[in-house]
Image: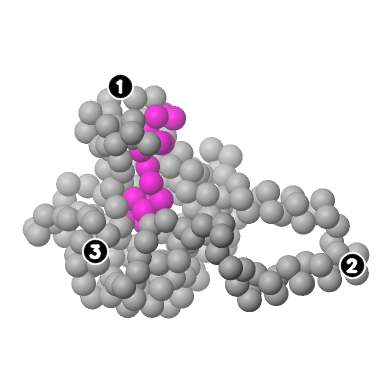
Amino acid sequence: MSDHSHEEAGSGRTTSPYAARIRAIEALLLEKGVLTEPEVQDSISYMEARSPANGAKLVARAWMDEDFEELLLSDAKSAASQLGMEPEHPAEFVVVKNTPEVHNLIVCTLCSCYPRAVLGRPPDWYKSFAYRSRVVVEPREVLREFGLELPEDKPIAVHDSSADLRYLVLPQRPEGTEGMVEDELAALVTRDSLIGTDVPRTAREASRV
């Protein structure tokens, strides 16, 4: 892929025509009294609260609690609700577990279906045609381009999200983290490891962040 930067564009980026259109619609709705400023701010706060940090909390709890892991894998929405998250989207929400025998990778080949209630907005590269078209054909090469080198004999399971089904990866717990508490474990979990294009940070890497 020509561009799959893991960093989002900075605040200095020129406002897109879509963003300008949204601002104009927002101003019109406020002017007509359809919405109030507090309602707009509440909606913004709600959207900003949905971030990969939620997915990291799910993973950290699963690493710490076998019963919670079992619930997460069998009924992800119920598990998320236990931690105060609201996966209210009518689509099914499925968590797939990485093991020594298989690595899971998420894509939406048709558009950009994504578990936004748990991970927030998808990164730009997830929506790109290059990622959507290539990852189902040559997943190992795509992962190499992201900097993730898997053993050649380790199978990669690619899961195609849709309007009816969203996926999240439960990555393997890094070695040497046995003494960590839940918040410390959550700090190891990156957004990309929840999609499958990366693995969690090691304890040493997290200490440098």
| Amino acid type at mark 3 | Glu
Residue under the image location 51 percent in, 57 percent down: 10
Report crowding for label 2: few under 14, some 14 to 19, many 20 or more residues within 10 A (C-alpha): few
Element on which disc 1 rests = loop
Q: Is residue 199 left or right of residue 58?
A: left
In the drawing, what numbered circle is on residue 31?
2
Image position, residue 98 (x, y; %) = 26, 49
Dominant SS in magenta: helix
The alpha-carbon separation of the residues under discs 1 and 3 comes to: 33 Å
Q: Which mark is residue 179?
A: 1
| Magenta part of the chain | 182-196
Label 2 – label 1 distance at C-alpha: 55 Å
84 inside magenta stretch = no
**Which residue, given by chain and number where applicable, does mark 3 sit on?**
145
43 with respect to 7 (left or right): right
User: Does residue 171 sit above or below 154 in this rendering?
Assistant: above
Helix, strand or loop status at disc 3: helix
Residue at the far left: name it: 153
Magenta highlight on residue 183: yes
